[in-house]
């Protein structure tokens, strides 16, 4: 998966590692952070484009996001598209949940 920042700068680390690094960095800077994940799709002529975003909001201090776009030439019915969107979102939510649990345990142990 090719992830990028909102400004177009590519993310070279695996997304799990980048999210972990980002959360750790924000915690180290004493920022209160909320993380949101969303997925959407759009049908264009002969392909379907999927977009997944991970949004990091700092309380009273702006935010930033990581974006992943993917195109599929496979013809999908609306129910298949909705199911695929849900699977993509659940996958990212699970990755974020594991990272949060790891960070909570790390904070508790230090």
Image (cartoon, rainbow, N blue to C red):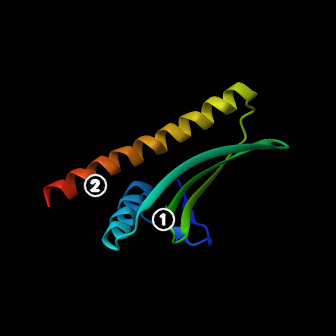
Q: Which mark is residue 33?
A: none
- Residue 57, compared with residue 69, is above or below; it is below
Residue sitting at the far right: 45
State the quadrant of the C terminus. bottom left
At 62% from the left and 29% from the top, the residue drawn is 83
Q: Residue at x 67, y 44 (%)?
A: 40
Tell me the SS state at disc 1.
Answer: loop
Q: Residue furthest left?
A: 109
Horizontal side of 78 relative to 16 (left or right) equals right
Instruction: Reply above or below: 108 against 50.
Output: below
Q: Left or right of 48: which side holds 65?
A: left
Q: Residues within 10 Å of mark 2 (few under 14, many from 20)?
A: some
Taking the view exactly as shown, the residue that stands out farthest to the front is: 60
Does residue 7 appear to the left or right of 41 in the view shown? left
The CA span between labels 2 and 1 is 19 Å
Frontmost residue, 81 versus 25: 25
In the rendered image, residue 108, in percent from the top left (x then y), is placed at: 18, 54
- The residue at the point 54 percent across, 67 percent down is 63
- The residue where tag 2 is placed is 103
Q: Position of residue 76 (x, y in %)?
A: 73, 31
Q: Please, what secondary structure does the residue beneath circle 2 have?
A: helix
- Corner quadrant of residue 14: bottom left
Which residue is disc 1 drawn over? 59
């Amino acid at each position: 998966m090719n992830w990028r920042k909102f400004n177009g700068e590519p993310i070279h680390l695996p997304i799990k590692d980048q999210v972990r690094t980002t959360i750790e960095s924000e915690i180290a800077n004493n920022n209160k952070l909320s993380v949101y994940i969303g997925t959407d799709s759009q049908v264009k002529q002969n392909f379907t484009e999927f977009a997944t975003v991970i949004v990091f909001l700092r309380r009273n201090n702006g935010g930033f996001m990581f974006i992943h776009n993917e195109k599929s030439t496979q013809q999908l019915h609306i129910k298949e598209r909705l199911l695929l969107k849900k699977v993509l979102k659940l996958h990212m939510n699970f990755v974020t949940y594991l990272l949060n649990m790891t960070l909570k345990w790390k904070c508790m142990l230090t």
